[in-house]
Every structure is written in C-alpha cells, then in structure tokens.
Amino acid sequence: MIEVKQVSDIKAESSVLEQLSQFDHEQVLFCQDKTTGLKAIIAVHNTVLGPSLGGTRMWAYKSESEALTDVLRLSRGMTYKSSLAGLNLGGGKAVIIGDARQDKSEALFRRFGKFVNSLAGKYITAEDVGITTKDIEYVAQETEHVAGLPEYMGGSGDPSPVTAYGVYMGMKAAAKQQFGSDNLNARKVMVQGVGHVGATLVDHLVKEGAKVMISDIYEDSLKAITKKHGGVEVVSLDQVYDVDMDIYSPCALGATVNDDTISRLKCSVIAGAANNQLANEVIHGKMVMDKGIVYAPDFLVNAGGIINCYWEVIGYNRDAAMSQTEAIYDTTSRIFAKSASDNIPTYLAANQLAEARIAAMKHVQSTY
Ligand code: NAD
C-alpha cells in the first residue's frame, strides 16, 4: 500500500534516495547536457498499472531540490489520478529546469526526447506548464513515447474540452450529494479562471440554466465569455470567495482552498479543474468537511485530460474517451458514499480507492 504523504512531508535536506523512498518512487532519471543547457529530472513513481504518463513542466526553479520536490510530488499525483480514473497507466512526470521564455531551443527539446526514449516506454511524456505544442513536436522527433500531440501530428489535440466535461460530471455528482438533485438549473456557480477548461465548463453550465459568475485576470477572456453568454456575471478577483454561491469551481490556480478562504466561502460544493486545490490536504480536507461543504477531489474530476491522452496511446477513439470521462460522475458518487460511511474527508476516500486498485492489480500481476 502506498503511504499518503503531504508535500511538506518531503524533507528537502534528505538524500535523494531517501526522498525517493519517502514517496515510494520506482526510478528517477537526472538528465544534463552541457551543449544544449538541458537540466531535467524525470520521475517514475509507480508502474503497477501500466507505463507512467504525465506532462513535462518547464520552470525556473530556484534550486535543484525545489525541482526534485516538485517532480516527486507531481509524479505521485499522476499515479493516483490514473488509478482512480480506471486507466492502465502509472504515474510519472518530468521537469526541465529553465526559463520557458529564454532557455528553449530545438536541440534542448530533442536532447530531452532522447532521454525520454532511453526509458523505453516506461515514461510517456506530454505538455504541462511552460511547454507548448511546438516544444513537444521536437520531443516527438526523438521518441514515440509522447501523448497529447496535436491532431495534425496524429494526436488527439487539446484535452481541455474533455477535462471540462469531466469537471461538469463531477460537479453534478457533488450537487446530487449535497442538494439531492444533480440538476444545476438556477444553481449559482462561481467559475474562477476562464481559460481552456473554465470557458468550456461555462458553456455546459449555461446550457443547463445555471447562474454563472466568472473571474479572470485577463479582461479579454472575460469579455469573450460575456459576449457569448449574456447572463454571465463578472466578479472581481478579490470578491471571488465572498460572493453568494452554491458551487465554487476553481479553474485557475491551486491552493485556493486554505485557512483564509474556507472561512469566507459561502458555497456548499467545491468542484473545479485546478490541481491541488486544498492548500494542505489533511488540514483543509478536514476543515471543508467540518463546514459541511462537499468537495469533489480535484485529481478525480479533472482526469478528462489524462483519459484523453490514454486513448491516444492505445488508439484514439473520441467517443470512448468521452464515455470514460462521463464515468467520473459514478466514481465521484462512490467516493462521497465512502466518505460518508467511513466518516473521512473525500480526498482521503479518493486516495484509498486509488490505492486499493493498485494493490488489487499488483496481486493480479503476481499470477501467471
Ligand atoms: P489556462 O491557463 O488555459 O486557464 C487558466 C485561467 O485562469 C487563465 O485564463 C488565467 O488568466 C486565469 N487565472 C490565473 N490566475 C487567476 C486568478 N488569480 N484569478 C482568476 N483567474 C486566474 O489553464 P487550463 O488549461 O484552463 O487549466 C485550468 C486549471 O486546470 C489549471 O490549474 C490546470 O493545471 C488544471 N488542469 C487542466 C487540464 C487541461 O486539460 N487543460 C487538465 C487537468 C488539470
């Protein structure tokens, strides 16, 4: 069984191998190439369910230990996400240490692609923060172990609409749990961040008759939505946590459910796309539960993107990807039932279901 740990539990001062054992990682590959300036870390957390899949992030980390902590945390998160989504995928992730605006080159990404290839399919990469389609195209010239490619390269294209559909399904399941009906008609929903996922989520909500409020740092993103949907109301950035709402949907940043915001939030459901919404799973998962808010775990409801990538890996079928994403509704409901019967926060119920599937499949694999 994988032990559930907080990010803060990783002790940066520990040796590298000690850090790997804290999160129970299988393998970590440190990549460096002087000529291209490449400095990267690929972390394979767990491959019991299948090859590890997770995006590559490019970020100007302040230190190597910060980069290592990030890649260990993110790769472990992918193990849980794929397990819960019922995918035959393990968890992995990569980080490239560098400034995404200054340090990119064709050679750097192709060299990185060679490192990915050296893992012979144990790790499949994709886009993440700081990485564009163009970058991933270079990676794909050196390895076939890439997912989330654009359609013109034989890939499945932007996964965001699929992610948005999964968030919508998870939100409906949460509404059913909290209000006794999954109908979102007239429900007041605050969508924080109307980028790729948030904008499509708004489409689903408006279609169902929800009273949608939106917030974003970019004026043009807000205008595009209000032009399309007349009834949508814009809320200023600092008002988001204080408005009268039934559902809060974080679709921008992580850690927005924290000591400060929980006391302000007037919602009774939290369901959104952003990763790591609870600033601290253990503390804020419990606080949210004690306040009577139904929290749909982020790594479950935002799994549409990884589901889409999975179908790209095994042979793309959009209908199958959408139907598997629709099943997020049932999985979310199962987690709420477990949370209620065991009297534990929903994030913990989700972690336990993810771990149980990995343990069961480990047993299956031990037989010939
Ligand atoms: P995006 O960058 O397209 O959109 C994020 C939006 O949030 C942007 O419009 C940005 O301006 C806005 N934003 C940033 N800071 C804000 C703030 N303080 N207040 C309000 N808005 C703010 O990203 P996306 O692809 O739509 O993803 C949204 C979230 O969902 C991210 O956290 C991402 O990691 C997560 N996620 C996305 C996918 C996917 O398929 N795209 C899959 C899983 C998880």
Image: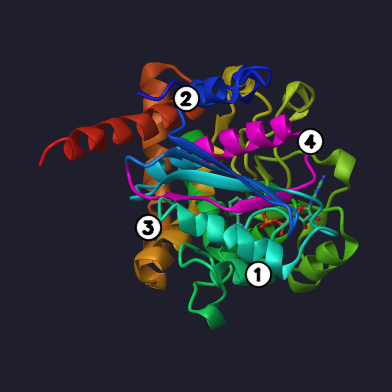
Decide: is 114 above or below 59.
Answer: below
How far apart are the two marked residues, 2 and 4, measured between alpha carbons?
24 Å
- Judge depth for marks 3 and 1 and give the one in front: 1
Q: Which residue is mark 3?
A: 324
Q: Position of residue 217 (x, y in %)?
A: 86, 53
- Judge depth for marks 1 and 2 and give the one in front: 1
Image-quadrant location for residue 335: top left
Q: Residues within 10 Å of mark 4 (few under 14, many from 20)?
A: many
Per the image, label 2 sits on a secondary structure element best described as helix
Pointer 2 with pointer 4, Cβ within 8 A = no
Residue drawn where x is 46% and y is 19% of the image: 344
Magenta stretch bounds: 49-77
Q: Which residue is mark 2?
A: 348
Q: Which residue is mark 1?
A: 133
Outermost residue to the left: 368
Horizontal side of residue 236 vs 250, given as left or right: right
N-term mark: 1 or 4: 1
Q: Nearer the viewer, residue 34 or 287?
A: 34
- Judge depth for marks 4 and 3 and give the one in front: 3
One can see residue 203 in this view: no
N-term mark: 1 or 2: 1
Q: Which residue is mark 4?
A: 241
